[in-house]
Amino acid sequence: MTATLFGLLGALLAGIGLFGLLVRTEALLRILAFNLLGGGIFLVFGAVARRGAGAGFAADPVPQAIILTGIVVAFAATTLAVALVVRIATDGDAGPGVGAGDAEAIAAGGVGGIAAGGAARPDATGAP
């Protein structure tokens, strides 16, 4: 009963995460939705491993190790994703949300202080 409940809650969590990943457009909310999806998958995987141990078999430590490794990797990926979002938000990006100052820097041949030829400019405005 407990493993079934954990499996159903994990599937619900994964469904909420998938819905948020498909519907949301904000970067931080998509990262949060991706974490919900991953958490649900980890919970379902743990419930499946627990059902095998509950059927009279010896508990297998491999699924537990895989879940723990997945959680660590998901934390590292989340940290990297949030750092990239913060960096893009502070530096500006060349995507659809380019501000007026960023558009001028792109038109001048460089973004973020890097000239079109790859040499760093002394200032980030794009002025020679």
Image: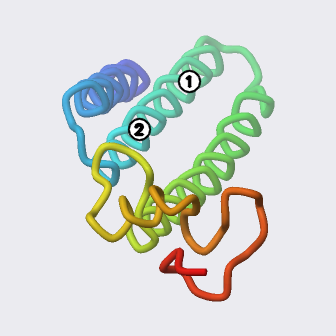
Question: Residue 12, how many percent across, how many down?
Answer: 26, 25
Front position in the image: 105 or 88: 105
Question: Residue 56, how many percent across, how many down?
Answer: 66, 14
Q: Between disc 1 and disc 2, whose residue precedes?
A: 2
Q: Which residue is mark 2?
A: 34
- Tell me the quadrant of the picture where the C terminus can be found: bottom right
At label 1, the amino acid type is Phe
Front position in the image: 43 or 28: 28
Mark number displayed over residue 45: 1
Q: Quadrant of residue 95?
A: top left
Residue 55 sits above or below residue 23 on the image = above
Question: Residue 86, how many percent across, how many down?
Answer: 44, 68
Find numbered disc 1 in the image and state the secondary structure of the residue it sits on: helix
**Residue appearing at x 55%, y 70% in the figure:** 112
Alpha-carbon span between mark 1 and mark 2: 17 Å
Name, please, the residue furthest toward the left.
23
Dot 1 alpha-carbon crowd within 10 angstroms: few under 14, some 14 to 19, many 20 or more: some
Q: Quadrant of residue 33?
A: top left
Along the horizontal axis of the image, is 101 left or right of 41? Answer: left
**Residue appearing at x 65%, y 21% in the figure:** 53
Disc number lying in front (1 or 2) = 2
How was this image coloured? rainbow
Find numbered disc 2 in the image and state the secondary structure of the residue it sits on: helix
Along the horizontal axis of the image, is 34 left or right of 122? Answer: left
At label 2, the amino acid type is Phe
Question: Residue 102, how many percent across, how many down?
Answer: 38, 65
